[in-house]
Image: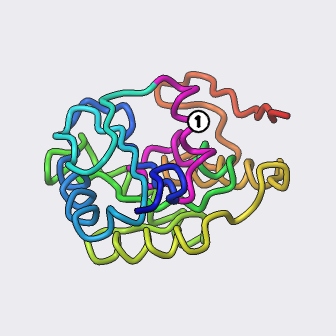
Amino acid sequence: MTSTYRKPLVFVTVGGDHHPFDRLMQWVERWLSDEGDRVRCVVQYGTALPPAGAECFDYLDHDALLGLMESARAVVSSGGPTTLLEARRLGHRPVVVPRRSSLGEHVDDHQRLFAARLHTENLVVRAEDEPAFRDAVHAAIDAPRIVTPRELSTEGVMRIGRLIDETAGFSTNDRTGSGGQSRDLSVTMLP
């Protein structure tokens, strides 16, 4: 039997939203029942039911989340923009399962819109159903990193920022949010 820590790490996160994301947890559990012997899977499950076969945490602090992302061969996430940006910054092309408002997973479908847009830009792999999820996770394990963190450019970060603005309905010249509040569009690059 292979040591747990020699197996590729798949990190799954539902983010910090209070809505349960049981659909993704069920997909992970079924996938692990078939593939769990070949991977180590760590799951941050929030308010959902934790999947059997994984190391599970309801929530993780930011440093722990980043550490798991950095160690992972594959990152699976809901469509939360911050998590996706962190995964990209660490060199991943994350597998994204966006939450659906029609299933009570979120208040609206902004994650679906954002994930669709990032998918068309080849920045993420969107998985809207279980077969697509399984295929995307297998592909991510087999070809895990797209770039090393140092290869990421300011232009790449700005590109994702523009996509967020466009998805949210802001023009690239619009520096105010709803209610006319000023928006800070500056970007700080980390070493």
Relative horizontal placement of residue 167, taking residue 49 as reference (left or right): right
Relative horizontal placement of residue 35, taking residue 61 as reference (left or right): left
The magenta region covers 61-84
Depicted 42 relative to depicted 144: above or below: above
Residue 129 is inside the magenta segment: no
Query: At 34% from the left edge and 64% from the top edge, which residue is drawn?
Result: 37
Name the quadrant of the C terminus. top right
Depicted 113 relative to depicted 154: above or below: below
Query: At 15% from the left edge and 45% from the top edge, which residue is drawn?
Result: 104
Q: Quadrant of residue 100?
A: bottom left
Query: At 31% from the left edge and 47% from the top edge, which residue is drawn?
Result: 54
Judge by depth and name the residue closer to the eye, 96 or 37. Answer: 37
Name the quadrant of the N terminus. bottom left
Query: At 56% from the left edge and 51% from the top edge, which residue is drawn?
Result: 72
Three-letter amino acid code at the position of disc 1: Leu
Q: Position of residue 41 (x, y in %)?
A: 39, 51
Q: Position of residue 145 (x, y in %)?
A: 66, 63
- Secondary structure of the residue carrying numbered label 1: helix
Judge by depth and name the residue closer to the eye, 124 or 41. Answer: 41
Q: Position of residue 112 (x, y in %)?
A: 36, 58
Residue 78 is inside the magenta segment: yes
Q: Position of residue 148 (x, y in %)?
A: 77, 56
- Residue bearing mark 1: 66
